[in-house]
Image (spheres, rainbow, N blue to C red):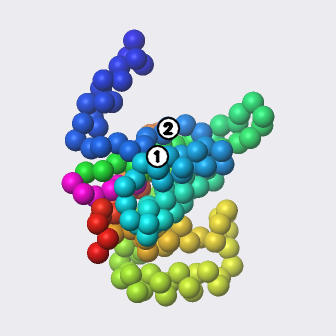
Amino acid sequence: MSHLNLYEQYSLTKDHFVILSFKGVISQEILVYLGSMIKSSLNLQSKKIKKVFAVFIELAQNILHYSAERNVDNEGYEGGVGILQTTEENEIYYVSAGNMVKNSQIESIKKNCEYVNSLSKEDLKIYYQVKIKQDRPQGSKGAGLGFIDIARKCDGPLEYKFNQIDEKHSFFTLSVSFKRDET
């Protein structure tokens, strides 16, 4: 009956107000639905809502496209499996995402996160403009701007962690924060 013990999950989140939590296959339909829930649940100024929403969508798309754990539905659609969570604690909103990655990708992800974290907001803007003019990175489903764009919008550094699952895979968690009040 351990699968019915939601109280354990509930207890783990007692110090945070959970606005949204989703674990499963990410699809375009799920993205639209979760996005509308985020917009209606946050009591933020318009500019801040747009930033939180944009980061939420970017993190969800990263799961959709890059999660090493894949699932195919009855209609043949393949999507990435992961977890998304938006919480509030002490006037700060957190948007977090997690999914499996190949261990061979860890160093590249760390390097990207650390580099982006080392840049000022102005340097991020310049780096974004440089990267957008370059060719799409090999293996990328986008322009390779995800971490840069997230860092430009959030109010703190990209916080990340890897939990090794086995010799081939780890669980990658990325979390960012937004101050509730616009400064």
- Tag 2: residue type? Lys
Residue occupying the point 37% across, 73% down: 117
> Residue 155 appears at what percent x and percent y?
33, 69
Q: Which residues are magenta?
A: 90-95
Marking on residue 31 = none
Residues tagged 1 and 2 counted as in contact (Cβ below 8 A): yes
Name the side, left or right, on which 74 lies relative to 33. right
Name the side, left or right, on which 70 lies relative to 102. right
Whether residue 170 is visible to the viewer of this picture, yes or no, is no
Secondary structure state at the residue bearing disc 2: strand
| Between 50 and 131, the one nearer to me in the picture | 50
Q: Residues within 10 Å of mark 2 (few under 14, many from 20)?
A: few
The residue to which callout 1 is attached is: 84
Q: Which of the marked residues, 1 or 2, is nearer the chain's N terminus?
A: 2
Whether residue 78 is visible to the viewer of this picture, yes or no, is yes
Position of residue 31 relative to residue 130, above or below, is above
> Residue 59 appears at what percent x and percent y?
51, 56
Task: Give the quadrant of the C terminus.
Answer: bottom left
Name the outermost residue toward the right: 75
Q: In the rendered image, which quarter is residue 17 located in?
A: top left
Residue occupying the point 36% across, 24% down: 6
Q: Considering the whole magenta stretch, tell me its main secondary structure.
A: strand
Residue occupying the point 24% across, 57% down: 91
| Between 73 and 54, the one nearer to me in the picture | 54
The residue to which callout 2 is attached is: 23
Name the side, left or right, on which 88 lies relative to 138. left
Secondary structure state at the residue bearing disc 1: strand
Estimate the spatial distance between the alpha carbons at disc 1 and disc 2, rounded to whole Å.
Answer: 6 Å
